[in-house]
Structure formats: C-alpha cells, structure tokens
C-alpha cells in the first residue's frame, strides 16, 4: 500500500483506497437520505427513518472530508460513525422477522469491517509523505553570511552610497542600441527595481524605500 | 525525455514525454541541471488551480544549460548557463516596458481564458495551468523557453546551482514582497508563513533594514530557520498571534505585513477554519483567506500589506472595512522576476545573501512523485526540495 522511493506516481494504493471509501460514503449517504425506508425495512428498524436520514447527512459530510486533501480526520470520524451504525443495526437482531434478524447480523459484520477498514486507511494516511521526526533545528541556516546584524539594512546602506549596478535606462539604452548584452542579459532587458521606463536615471532603489 | 507530469489531484507521475523542439526564432532549449518544487506547485497538486489538464508537465523553478537556440535569438548561445524566470515576458509590450513582467500582455497564448478568469491576461507561466498559457514546465530533463531572448537570467560562472536556482521565483518573490512594504528603519515587519518564500522575505526585510522582523508559522523547524535570520517567531498553535504582535509592538501592530501563505492558509481559530474548509469543499469559495483577514485586522493603521502568496479565485468574509478605515495599502502580484535580478545577483556575489540555506532535500528527478507528498505533508522536516534530472534514483 505505501509508496516506495522510485515509483512512478505520487498517487498510491492507499490514496486509491481512500478515494474508494469516499465515493462509497457519498453513495451510501445519498441513498440513506433519499430512501431511508429501504434501510429500516431491511434491518428491522421501522420508525427510525429520520435517524437514517441523519446518518445520511453524516455520511455525506464524512465523504467530503474523505475526498479532501487531508482525509485522515474524516476517516477516523468515519470509523466512529461505523460504530454508531453497528449499534443501530444491532437493534434489528431483536426483530421477530428472521430475514431482518439475519440482515442485522450481516449489517453488524459489515459495520465492524468498515470500521476496521476506515481505521486502517486513516493509519495509512498518517504515514503519507514519510515519518514525522522531531522538529529539525535549522538555526544554523541564516542565509546571511555576514551575520544578521551586519546584514540589517545592508542593501539600504549600499544604495545610499550610489548605484553599483546598471540602471534600467542604462540597460535599456544598451539593448536598443544593439550593444552587447553580456552584462544586461542577467536580467534581460530591464531590471530596475520598481521603476518605469519614464524614470530618469536615479539609483535603483526599490519603490518607496526611504533614503534618510 | 523524462518529466514530472500532472494527472489529477495528488497524482504526479515520472513519465517519458516528447523532447521539446524549437518552435519560434526567439526560443531556446535548455538541458535542466536543477529544478525545485515550489509551494505554489502544491496548489496544482491539490487541484485547487483551475485549468490543468492530464499530461501537463509541471515545474517553474528551473535552470540549466542552453543546448539549442532559435535563429532569431541573438541573446543566447549554446553552452550558456541560465536560470529561467517563471514568468515568460516579451520585453516589447506596454507592461514589459514598465518592468511589470508578470503581467506581460503577449506571452500568455491562452489570453482569452485568462481574461475570463481575471478580466485581463497575465503573463504566460511555465507549468502552471492553461490559464497562463499551458506551457510545459521545468521539472523535466529538457525545457523549451519561449521568448528566451528576454526570458532568462545568465548565471555567473562561480555561482553554484543552489545559489542561483531560486532567482527563478522564490527569492525575487520574497524580495518583491519586502520591497512592496516600503520598509523604513523603525519598521516592524510581520511575515505570515515561514515556508521558502517567507524565509526569503525575512532575509529581504533584514537586508532592507527592518528594525524588527516577526515570522508566524505552525512548524517549529521553519521557525528555527526564521530565527536563524534574526526573526522573532510566533507559533499560532502555541500562542495568540494577536496578543504576541501587540506585545512586540506596544499595542500598535506591525507597520508592514507580508502574506507568504496564500490560498491554503490554516486558521488557529477552529470555527473559522471549518467555515473556510466547508465553503471550499462545497465550491462556494476557492481560497481560504485567513491570513489576509488577520493581516488586515493586525496591521498598524497606515501600514502596508504585501501579498506574495498565490490566490486563484474568490474569497469570502474579507474585513474590507478594516482595510479601508485604517488606510492600509494592499500590494500584490506575482513577482516581476527580472526586475529584481541585478540587485539579487549582486547581493549573492558580495556574500550578503546565500539562498541555498533553504534547501533541505536534494533528490533525483525520478523521486519527484514521492517528494511532492513529502513536501506537502511537511514531514521529514522538509522545507525546500531541489530535484536533479541528471542523478540516478536510488
């Protein structure tokens, strides 16, 4: 069920299982809402049609969760709902009708089986993407080789000292004069921070960056 | 060639696809040496972005070596080492002439679709839905770069792939968000989301001179990386964001706020989260805007909100009254990659910034289908995945 490194798809057997459960739950929920009488008659639960309709709403809700990108909570909720179904269907074993009594026992087995399946699927989803180890400590990854305090305002101070890179207009002129693009090609045809072609040659300070 | 191909929700496959060919004189073909999985690729993985088709090659953070060039392309030659900006830009339209490359008017070959969704077309993007042109993406062995005479960044020889690759997207995205904030020396900048873009925004805010930078995220490993750059961290799962922000700002609120989360945000307030989840599941809203709501309510009056996280459609229950009455400025947009290239290359070259800090996983391209769920679930302490087409799978 679980994916293995090097397999060709991110969609795994466990994903397919969960989608199947979700679609089944959707169908069951609609059936329970549309024709609850068929269920009450089958399991000897006459008079409990509204309860079956409520279960139908619950099934559709769990189906939406099961078909979402994070199905694990809905699967655990489904497992709990299966136990409610089991208890409800078990009431049918007291029926005098032998067929209803037999159906109730089959229903108990099915509910128990679905509860196990939902719990199994929820466990598989918990393992999706690998194990969750203790949080890593990335406190040595500043990305600021000069150190945090030396970096604070580094760009601002650099700009205050004057342009060190070609301004937008300088690059544009070079492009349109057909000159070499050896330098300007790093940024294509333009690149001045937040300035428009109508800007006239100031240092490339990002828009609104205050220079005090 | 081999590539990572989208087939539906949570279904990315490593498959053989046709080799790209020159289709236009301005094109170039690159042999990909490194590519990365972006947080916004997860929106495709979750099938939240409309306009994907089974068989689409994904990926928009890519670099490599030029192996073929169209006859009209005088800017590149075979052997050049380039980073590919995720926005395709013509360099000739009204927007490109103003440096607004991410809204290039000519590069989206499905402009009519984009007009239906957004009112006007935006730039063509690599590997990012047919609304933005349906161009094959760069998580592949080879990539055709349309309008390559403008859509490229030449990489200094002494830069490693790991130093240069993020010039394609997450570094200029974080930088633009910080620039949009008009940071002043006394400013407190609060950044929601300490994923890769949030991490870049933190470093950018520091380099632009913010007095205090605050990072907000649920994941301890991300917060430790944020703290490494001097950020004060808030874990919404452990403390109230509102109380902590007020404590850090003398009850004034942060002067500037950056949304580095986007359309799939999680609220620590359960009823709000369930509300958005339910509406999203029932297709009554496309995006979960918790971060936007929180920024509008938390930001100091007169402040600036910069949105770097991706949104795709329709949002619900936005406290627009707070935005208006507090006089907040809202600045958004996909980053205009090449607009920021020179200063970012300069910062890397001077040793003031090393973007490779964010990489936590490097894998062969063939392991891409497994790295998507690893990245998605944030397990294995995964923050950023780089894929190498040239490496053999284990």
Image: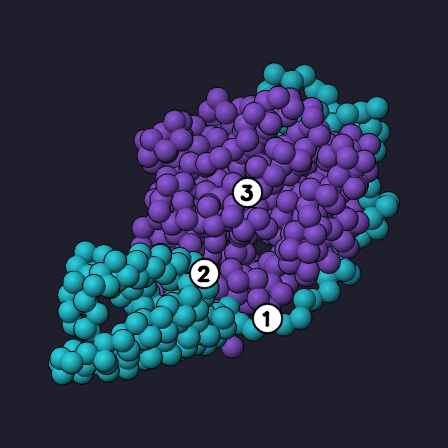
Chain colours: A cyan, B purple
Give the residue displayed 38% in from the left and 79% down from the top. A116
Tell me where residue B71 appears, x and y as whole percent.
Answer: 42, 40
Q: Secondary structure at mark 3?
A: helix
What chain does mark 2 sit on? A
Give the residue displayed 35% in from the left and 53% down from the top. B56
Residue annotated with mark 3:
B290
Marks 1 and 3 close (CB-CB < 8 Å):
no
Q: Nearer the viewer, mark 1 or mark 3?
A: 3
Residue annotated with mark 2:
A70
Q: Are marks 1 and 2 on the same chain?
A: yes
Tell me where residue B151 appears, x and y as whole percent.
Answer: 51, 39
Mark 1 vs mark 2, CA separation in Å: 16 Å
What chain does mark 1 sit on? A
Of residue A48 and residue B182, the one placed in the foreground of this image is A48
Mark 3 vs mark 2, CA separation in Å: 18 Å
Asked if residue B171 shows in the view, the reply is no
Q: For mark 2, does the 10 Å Cα neighbourhood hold few (<14), some (14 to 19), or many (20 or more) residues?
A: some
Asked if residue B260 shows in the view, the reply is yes
Q: For mark 1, does the 10 Å Cα neighbourhood hold few (<14), some (14 to 19), or many (20 or more) residues?
A: some
Circle number at residue B228: none
Q: Quadrant of the N terminus of chain B?
A: bottom left
Residue annotated with mark 1:
A132
Q: Secondary structure at mark 2?
A: loop
Tell me where residue B7 appears, x and y as whole percent.
Answer: 34, 58
Give the residue displayed 48% in from the left and 30% down from the top. B103
Q: Secondary structure at mark 1?
A: loop
Q: For mark 3, does the 10 Å Cα neighbourhood hold few (<14), some (14 to 19), or many (20 or more) residues?
A: many
């Amino acid at each position: 069920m679980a994916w293995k490194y090097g397999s060709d798809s991110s969609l795994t057997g466990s994903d397919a299982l969960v989608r199947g459960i979700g679609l089944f739950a959707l169908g069951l929920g609609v059936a329970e809402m549309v024709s609850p009488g068929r269920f009450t008659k089958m399991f000897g639960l006459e008079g409990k049609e509204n309860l079956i309709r409520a279960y139908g709403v619950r099934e559709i809700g769990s189906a939406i969760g099961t078909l979402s990108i994070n199905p694990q909570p809905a699967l655990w909720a489904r497992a709990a709902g299966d136990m409610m179904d089991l208890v409800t269907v078990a009431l049918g074993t007291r029926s005098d009708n032998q067929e209803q009594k037999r159906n109730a026992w089959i229903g108990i087995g099915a509910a128990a089986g679905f509860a196990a399946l939902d719990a199994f699927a929820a466990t598989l989803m918990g393992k999706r993407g690998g194990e969750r180890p203790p949080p890593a400590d990335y406190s040595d990854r500043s990305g600021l080789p000069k150190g945090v305090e030396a970096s604070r305002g580094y760009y601002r101070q650099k700009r205050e000292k004057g342009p060190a890179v070609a301004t937008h207009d300088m690059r544009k002129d070079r492009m349109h004069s057909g000159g070499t693009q050896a330098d300007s090609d790093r940024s294509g045809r333009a690149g001045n921070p937040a300035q428009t072609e109508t800007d006239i040659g100031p240092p490339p300070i990002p828009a609104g960056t205050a220079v005090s | 060639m081999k590539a990572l191909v989208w087939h539906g929700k949570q279904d990315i496959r490593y498959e053989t696809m046709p080799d790209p060919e020159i289709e236009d004189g301005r094109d170039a073909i690159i042999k990909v040496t490194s590519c990365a999985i972006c947080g916004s690729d997860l929106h495709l993985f979750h099938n939240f972005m409309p306009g994907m088709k089974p068989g689409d090659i994904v990926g928009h953070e890519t670099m490599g070596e030029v192996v073929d060039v169209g006859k009209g392309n005088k800017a590149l030659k075979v052997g050049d080492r380039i980073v590919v900006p995720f926005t395709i830009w013509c360099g000739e339209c009204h927007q490109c002439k103003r440096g607004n490359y991410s809204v290039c008017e000519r590069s989206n070959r499905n402009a009519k679709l984009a007009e239906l969704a957004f009112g006007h077309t935006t730039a063509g993007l690599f590997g990012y839905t047919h609304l933005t042109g349906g161009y094959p993406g760069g998580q592949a062995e080879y990539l055709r770069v349309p309008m390559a005479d403008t859509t490229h960044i030449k990489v200094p020889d002494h830069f490693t792939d790991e130093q240069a690759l993020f010039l394609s997207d997450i570094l200029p995205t974080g930088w633009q968000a910080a620039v949009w904030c008009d940071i002043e020396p006394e400013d407190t900048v609060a950044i929601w989301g300490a994923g890769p873009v949030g991490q870049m925004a933190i470093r950018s805010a520091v380099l632009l001179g913010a007095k205090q930078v605050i990072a907000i995220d649920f994941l301890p490993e991300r917060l430790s990386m944020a703290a490494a750059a001097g950020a004060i961290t808030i874990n919404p799962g452990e403390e109230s964001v509102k109380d902590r922000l007020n404590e850090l700002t003398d009850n004034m609120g942060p002067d500037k706020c950056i949304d580095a989360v986007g359309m799939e945000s999680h609220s620590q307030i359960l009823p709000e989260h369930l509300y958005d989840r339910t509406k999203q599941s029932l297709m009554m809203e496309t995006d979960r805007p918790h971060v936007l709501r929180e920024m509008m309510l938390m930001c100091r009056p007169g402040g600036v909100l910069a949105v770097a996280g991706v949104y795709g459609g329709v949002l619900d229950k936005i406290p627009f009254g707070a935005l208006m009455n507090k006089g907040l400025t809202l600045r958004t947009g996909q980053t205009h990659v090449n607009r920021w290239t020179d200063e970012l290359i300069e910062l890397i070259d001077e040793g003031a910034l090393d973007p490779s800090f964010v990489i936590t996983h490097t894998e062969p391209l063939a392991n891409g289908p497994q790295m998507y769920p690893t990245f998605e679930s944030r397990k294995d302490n995964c923050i950023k995945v780089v894929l190498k087409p040239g490496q053999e799978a284990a």
